[in-house]
Image: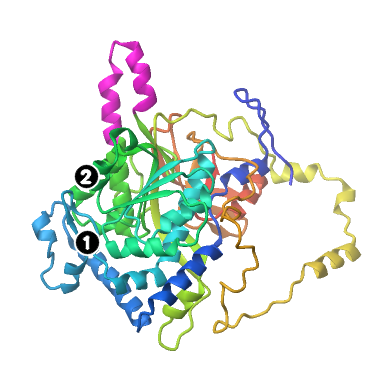
Amino acid sequence: MTMASLLQETSQKVITSEILRSAAKQSQRCLVVPVRLRRAIKKYLRDQEVPHLRRKVLRLSESFSGIKDVNLQLAATTSKELVEDPLKSVEQSKRWKIKSCYGDIGFQYTDDETVAYVASRMPAVFSACYRVLNEVRRRLPDFSPSNVLDFGAGTGSAFWALREVWPHSIEKVNIVEPSQSMQRAGRSLIQGLKNLPLIHGYDSIQALSKDISKSEREHDLVIASYVLGEIPSLKDRVTIVRQLWNLTKDVLVLVEPGSPHGSNIISQMRSHILWMEKRKWHKYENKKNIASKDLVTQTCGAYVVAPCPHDGKCPLTNSGKYCHFVQRLERTSTQRAYKRSKGESLRGFEDEKFSFVAFRRGQRPREPWPLDGMRFETLKEQHAKRNPEDLEIDYEDLIKMRTQDIVPYQEVDPVTYDSDVMETEDLDGDGEEEGEEQEESALADLGGGWGRIVFSPRRRGRHISMDICRSIKRDASEGSFERVVVTQSKNPTLHHQARRSIWGDLWPF
């Protein structure tokens, strides 16, 4: 493949097709849950000795589905009194309300429900959190959080993901989890881990604010994963998110299930924070004091790190589509054991759908767009440059290469498969090796030149069509949702990149 290069006037940096492809890659095809987490879950379940766990896992799943249906039928202006028993006929809805001064803040888990959650849901929630935090690390290479707040921590899925993504920098973690059963499970799962940061647990934001000084309330990173959907009232949900934003010094990450309801929550919270910071910015924009304006420029404002390439109105609003992504993970041995239905074997993987948004304080940096001034050769031009010698084929070398690539396939028996035993890595370390991935050769900047591929690309012959959310202004203040078609004849280089792009990757403009 011929490399297309551009000497950018601003950065004097040569851009090649390989650099573009490396920077655009954000999604991960199939995630393997770290062996430490798998063994911790297995040990925890063995110590609990809960009878009929398969039945409890099924009941917990049905309970989530019932609560989801209740939330979808609630009006956005529903009062707290009506939320306490929304449909009068759903008795299970009473078990998951926890009241606080901020309203309804979560589910109330019994010990059996907590054990069922660890066995069935924790690996999937971890995979979504890891996927999101890993992209934040790639998009913000200068960001290394030391003080973290995990709101709605549950059994610690986000904490395990944080340990994998930033194994060296995290020094202190504040956990807010109203369910005491969940807190106990989270503490039990991390027993035996080395080099743990300082961890403090609270049952509400109010308790957190009372316990720590005002100077310590700002956290480098605040994450709320799979918790906002447990708050039925929109008013309470907005109040919680504003509290979390006030506790954020740098980056705020919100993650929800990849359902229409979860995507709608993320879209609402995204609009609210951007509107709130934009209004604050306008208040100081016309101030005469230049020194105060410079100070406000550094502390005021917010922009979206991911997934949105712009800070304008979501172009999917009222379109009948919803923004979500998917992370495939290899099922653990405990998931295979307790999620198995009657007489049916489970697949070796599952797809966890999620919606998310990551904010950063300040103003979005202005960066040159990746394809500015770049010219790609067409397929016809590439063919015209070929030498006759390049078309000759050495069939002996070709056959030898093909036979070397053949790997015999072996079917794994799903009954005897144990992903926790098949691992061969050394477990005597401090858990830092798995988080230290090989550094990528190129990183996508935060300018408006990188669009996001939403939904799976469609391949029809030599045509590839992709649905992309992109910025249409240089300052990334406005965006649109477009279908981009790439053909091999017009642009073989971008066509080669599109063939390897999947749902969730970036696309250069």
Read off the magenta span. Answer: 275-300
Q: Is residue 229 above or below residue 442?
A: below
* Residue 350 rendering spot, x and y as whole percentages: 47, 69
**Residue of label 2:** 239
State the residue at coordinates (47%, 35%): 448
Q: Is residue 203 above or below residue 396?
A: above
* Residue 166 rendering spot, x and y as whole percentages: 52, 47
State the residue at coordinates (62%, 40%): 442
For the residue pair 100 and 14, the one nearer the viewer reads as: 100
Which SS type dominates the magenta stretch?
Answer: helix
1 or 2: tag closer to the N-terminus: 1
Question: Does any portion of residue 484 appear in the rendered image?
Answer: no
Q: Quadrant of the C terminus?
A: top right
Badge 1 amino acid: Asn
Question: Does any portion of residue 234 appear in the rendered image?
Answer: yes
Mark 2 residue element: helix
* Residue 290 rendering spot, x and y as whole percentages: 34, 11
Badge 2 amino acid: Thr
Outermost residue toward the bottom? 343
* Residue 200 rendering spot, x and y as whole percentages: 35, 50
Mark 1 residue element: helix
**Residue of label 1:** 71
State the residue at coordinates (26%, 57%): 178
Q: Is residue 348 above or below residue 219?
A: below
Taking the magenta stretch, the answer to whether it contains residue 296 is yes
User: How is the structure coloured here?
Assistant: rainbow
390 horizontally vs 431: left or right: right
